[in-house]
Image: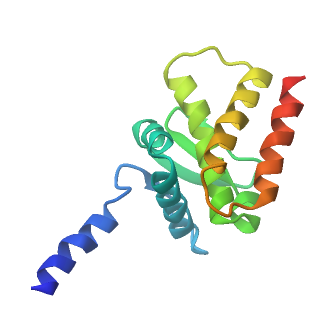
Amino acid sequence: MRKLILIPLLFFSINLFGQIKIDDIGDNWKSRVDSALTLIKTYDSVKYGVINKYCKHITFWNGTFSTLENQETIMIAQRDMIGGSINNIAAAIVHESFHMYRWNNNLERGMNIEECMGYTYELEFLMKIPNVEPFLIEHAKEMIEFYKK
């Protein structure tokens, strides 16, 4: 009987993020992104809903910051993956999903105001994570101030 219950649970966990294709480039990056998505879903189901609705693909690049490749693809920076915690990866995904939401809904896009709003959106998420690294909170606050100018 236990095996009958275990088998569907295994399939559920495999398909948990079935709509979002995560590139598997090695170094355990795909599983780290899976963990970040689980973290987002656990602590902020609304922001997870935005990601699940608009994001179809998560990939990686060698740039210095995470960004969007198009309306459906988040590109996580190598720097965020190598030096970043799961909380940092989750914050990058949440931040980029904010831009993705605006892009997909044809909302006005302007660098400074949109980045300020994006970091505010990210900070709201970070404040919900228990024992989040203080440097992530500080970084979001610094970026909000920087882009307010």
**Which is more toward the observer, 107 or 23?**
107
Q: Residue at x 68, y 57 (%)?
A: 88
Q: Residue at x 59, y 33 (%)?
A: 98
**Which is more toward the observer, 60 or 38?**
38
Q: Is residue 51 left or right of residue 111?
A: left
At which x and y percent is residue 139?
82, 48
At which x and y percent is residue 143?
83, 38
Q: Quadrant of the N terminus?
A: bottom left
Q: Is residue 62 left or right of residue 147?
A: left
Could you tell me if residue 64 is visible in this image? Answer: no
Q: Residue at x 50, y 47 (%)?
A: 44
Could you tell me if residue 102 is visible in this image? Answer: yes
Indicate whether 45 appears above or below 6.
above
Q: Is residue 49 left or right of residue 94?
A: left
Coloring scheme used = rainbow
Location of residue 125 (image quadrant): top right
